[in-house]
Image (spheres, coloured by chain):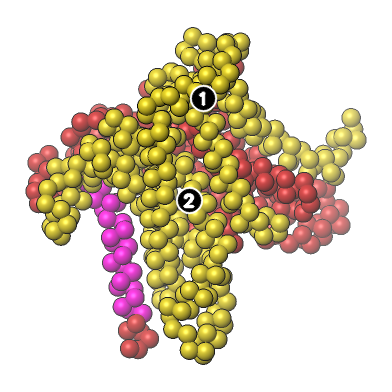
Chain colours: A yellow, B red
């Protein structure tokens, strides 16, 4: 007993305790739920069987029933559109801004940091603001679009099934652009400047320098940022709750919002768990790509 | 073009871009000051003609914001305390050694970092119901947030510990310090700033957390401000000035912290996420 105590105070036991406690905690509150989720996806779980551990085992019934539902395929398609649209917008805008601020004039880094307020704001507040900006009759976005002659009539962003998903995509692009820009700036500043001097002496113009130096040097950064973007867009929940609520008629519903909706609005926890399991597989895949592209950091 | 002229031009363009990007934030503040009819004016006014400061006191009292913000603060502080207590030591060990086990641990941490809260909430909710944790809903939310955000904290703080020279700790050990002594007297003080910045980041995240609170806290008097904002925004609401006033009172403290500590937060964030 005393030897254990001494080791915790002054030896290997100290390290093991420091790592052991948090990992036990994480296992209990993240690992176990993950396993429990898989178990529940094979069970029938509703309001009545919520409290009991023994529940009817239904095999793959949840999965089969899920894919028979007419809304499943549209919602999965929405998820893909949401992810691809958001990442493309965030990345391109973020890269453009990062390249601009990279020219390094006085005040650049301070102004660049200011952009990050979009990222530290609570997601629900961002959603509320965009809900108001995007509103049909009195929204200020419609006003700008009308004034610039891009549209004739008002677009009902939140209630028109053709636009509702894009309403959330716009808000999500705004939310994520700054984060993309900051991380891309870090990558850009890590490129050694003499590469550009050498290329300039050889007569390469700005366009050629971008394609032959900047992009290749940024490859691992870009890979990490795209996979981080995928992870963050698949986590996006607050904007859906604040802007469209998945509607109208599921036209802006995505898998991660649907999973919550099934569990907490329709009280079909088994089916909610089933979608969670399917989505978790995708997220894990994205995470594996992310870890791979930052493995230099991980290995030290 | 001279160097100064170029710099001025670039700064001007940067200001314009920042203004466009931050317009939604400006629109929140302006709308919160507008009156009922000015809010729906066409064309919209971009500066409130008669600022309605009374909106703030009205919303604060009618929506019971003091209680909501108190709950948000309790949840955020609880989460940060738990995460910092557990995560700091974990980050230290993961930064100090370099072997297969550390690699595996980091890999697990990164994997846990990515699990979306809206997917994890189903099993966590069912599990918490079964063990009776939902009788203490705010504690349940704190535990869930801690599990969700701790990996991020560990990754950020580990980057800080990597910058603390190992020699300093070894010198302290040679001087007769125990491991615990060296950790608390040498390593922690040196890493204090990085830990503080990461804790502030986690605090801001937890202050705005929504999914777990919405799903697990049924009692209105225990709900945080994010849930309060959500129930304020009905599907056909027209009191946008009041909602924006609510949003203003909710985010302004966060924005103030951010603007004050901007440089440190940005550098702390970038050192951990990638490099």
Q: Which mark is residue A50?
A: none
Q: Residue at x 26, y 43 (%)?
A: A163
The quarter of the picture where residue A129 lies is top left
**10 Å crowding of disc 1: few (<14), some (14-19), many (20+):** some
Where disc 2 sits, the SS reads helix
Report the predominant secondary structure element of the magenta stretch.
helix
Q: Which residue is mark 2?
A: A229
Q: Which mark is residue A63?
A: 1
**10 Å crowding of disc 2: few (<14), some (14-19), many (20+):** many
A167 vs B236, left or right, is right
Please report whichever mark, 1 or 2, sits nearer to the chain's N-terminal start: 1
Where disc 1 sits, the SS reads helix
Nearest-to-viewer mark from 1 and 2: 1
Q: Nearer the viewer, residue A119 or A165?
A: A165
A290 vs B98, left or right, is left
The chain ID associated with circle 1 is: A
Which range of residues does the magenta coloring cover? B7-34
Q: Residue at x 38, y 61 (%)?
A: A93
């Amino acid at each position: 007993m005393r030897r254990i105590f001494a080791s915790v105070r002054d030896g290997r036991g100290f390290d093991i305790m420091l790592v052991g406690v948090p990992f036990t905690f994480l296992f209990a509150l993240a690992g176990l739920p993950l396993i429990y989720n898989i178990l529940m996806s094979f069970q029938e779980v509703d309001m009545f069987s919520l409290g009991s551990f023994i529940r009817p085992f239904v095999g793959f019934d949840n999965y089969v029933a899920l894919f028979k539902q007419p809304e499943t395929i549209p919602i999965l398609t929405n998820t893909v559109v949401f992810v691809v649209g958001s990442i493309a917008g965030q990345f391109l805008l973020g890269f453009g801004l990062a390249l601009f601020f990279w020219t390094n004039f006085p005040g650049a880094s301070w102004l660049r940091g200011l952009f990050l307020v979009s990222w530290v704001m609570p997601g629900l507040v961002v959603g509320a603001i965009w809900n108001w900006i995007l509103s049909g009759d009195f929204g200020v976005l419609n006003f700008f679009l009308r004034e610039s002659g891009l549209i004739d009539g008002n677009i009902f962003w939140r209630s028109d099934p053709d636009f509702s998903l894009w309403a959330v995509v716009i808000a999500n692009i705004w939310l994520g652009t700054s984060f993309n820009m900051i991380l891309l700036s870090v990558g850009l500043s890590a490129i050694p400047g003499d590469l550009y001097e050498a290329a300039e002496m050889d007569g390469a113009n700005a366009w050629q320098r971008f394609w032959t130096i900047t992009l290749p040097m940024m490859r691992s950064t870009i890979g990490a940022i795209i996979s981080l973007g995928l992870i963050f867009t698949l986590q996006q929940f607050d904007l859906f709750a604040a802007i469209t609520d998945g509607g109208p008629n599921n036209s802006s519903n995505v898998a991660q919002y649907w999973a919550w909706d099934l569990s907490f609005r329709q009280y079909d926890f088994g089916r909610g768990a089933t979608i969670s399991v399917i989505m978790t597989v995708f997220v894990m895949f994205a995470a594996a790509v992310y870890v791979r592209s930052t493995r230099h950091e991980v290995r030290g | 073009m001279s160097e100064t002229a170029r710099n001025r031009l670039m700064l001007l363009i940067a200001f314009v871009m920042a203004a466009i990007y931050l317009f939604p934030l400006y629109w929140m503040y302006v709308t919160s000051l507008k009156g009922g009819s000015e809010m729906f004016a066409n064309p919209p006014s971009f500066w409130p003609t008669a600022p309605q400061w009374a909106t703030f006191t009205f919303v604060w009292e009618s929506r019971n914001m003091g209680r909501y913000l108190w709950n948000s603060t309790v949840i955020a502080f609880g989460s940060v305390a738990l995460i910092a207590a557990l995560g700091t030591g974990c980050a230290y060990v993961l930064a100090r050694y370099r072997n297969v086990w550390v690699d595996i641990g980091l890999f697990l941490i990164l994997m846990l970092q990515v699990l979306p809260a809206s997917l994890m909430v189903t099993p966590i909710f069912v599990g918490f119901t079964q063990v009776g944790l939902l009788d203490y809903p705010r504690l349940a939310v704190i535990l869930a947030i801690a599990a969700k955000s701790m990996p991020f904290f560990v990754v950020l703080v580990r980057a800080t510990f990597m910058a603390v020279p190992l020699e300093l700790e070894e010198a302290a050990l040679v001087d007769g310090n125990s491991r615990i002594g060296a950790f608390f007297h040498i390593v922690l003080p040196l890493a204090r700033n990085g830990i503080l910045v990461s804790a502030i980041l986690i605090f801001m995240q937890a202050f705005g957390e929504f999914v777990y609170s919405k799903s697990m806290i049924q009692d209105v008097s225990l709900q945080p401000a994010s849930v309060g904002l959500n129930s304020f925004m009905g599907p056909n609401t027209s009191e946008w000035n009041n909602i924006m006033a609510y949003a203003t009172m909710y985010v302004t403290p966060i924005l103030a912290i951010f603007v004050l500590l901007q440089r440190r937060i940005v550098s702390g964030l970038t050192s951990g996420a990638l490099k």
